[in-house]
Image (tube, rainbow, N blue to C red):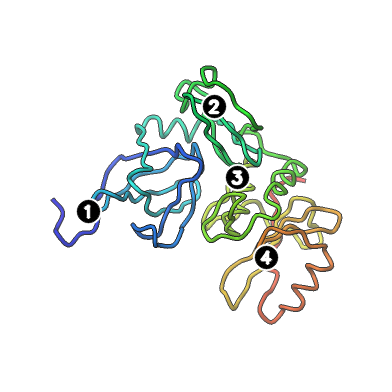
Amino acid sequence: MPKENFSEWPLGDGYGICRQTILPVYRKPTVDSSLVTQLLFGECYQVLAVSSDRTWYRVFHEDSRLGGWISHKSLKEITPEDYQNYLNQDFQVVVSPIAAIEYMGSNLYLLPGSRLHFSDLELFNWEDHIGFTGQTRSHAIKADRDELIQIALKYLNAPWQSGGRSIFGLDERLGFALIFQIAGYSWHAGHLPGRLIPFVDCEVGDILIVNNKAEDKDHYGIYLGLEEVLQMDGRMKILDWDEWIFKMGNNRNKQEVLEVRTVFSS
């Protein structure tokens, strides 16, 4: 039995899956707390603890290496075996800005990055559902430069939202990580994808990383080609290369280009 002053009970071997369009994950067990991240339909998580009143669960999202609290109303438990299979087997990733599934007599709307597990252990039987509207891609197949740009541009004009992972609100770091995850590349907290390359070798789909010393944080961009850069500045927007360089130059006392990275072999 936990001591009375404990605010949570630890749990062992607990696992869950997101079965709603967006699942908010909070820093503290209250809706007044800040948003750590959002889980999308089909993403799995570990269940680590429950609040003393059993209305909140502390979870950990292995793909992003982020954790926080979700409401007990959103908890959908799965077995440890299903959790491992969902993580290790291939799955389809939604790439349409908004997709829809007609299932069990109701519509379920899905956003880019949502996962559809097509296997013997899938979330639902793909052949038995009423219909799916939208486009998906296999997560096991890594996107080329052109496909990566197509995925990235679906978030054009998405407004900034701390912790957001959707076209309706996008956190800068989580948003760029989501773009690359949809494209089949790993990007999680503390681990940037790809390899460093010289700035002069930057090509379409490569990542531009700028450090703001005053804020002690990184800012990201994707080179789109034709001297254009996709970046977050209040919203996801496109700057031409000269405008981007000028902006960096005007902020040279606060910012500096740290690196250019690529996930492509050539």
Q: CA distance from mark 1 to mark 3?
A: 35 Å
Q: Which residue is mark 4?
A: 233
Q: Amino acid at mark 2?
A: Glu
Quarter location, residue 222: bottom right
Q: Which residue is mark 1?
A: 52
Query: Is 135 rendered above or below residue 150?
Result: above
Q: Are marks 2 and 1 in contact (CB under 8 Å)?
A: no
Q: Amino acid at mark 3?
A: Gln
Q: Which residue is mark 2?
A: 102
Q: Is residue 110 left or right of residue 55?
A: right
Of 51 and 67, the residue lying toward us: 51
Query: Is 42 rendered above or below residue 198?
Result: above
Q: Is residue 224 left or right of residue 106?
A: right
Q: CA distance from mark 1 to mark 4?
A: 40 Å
Quarter location, residue 133: top right
Q: Determine whether the residue tagged by mark 2 lies in a helix, strand or loop.
A: strand
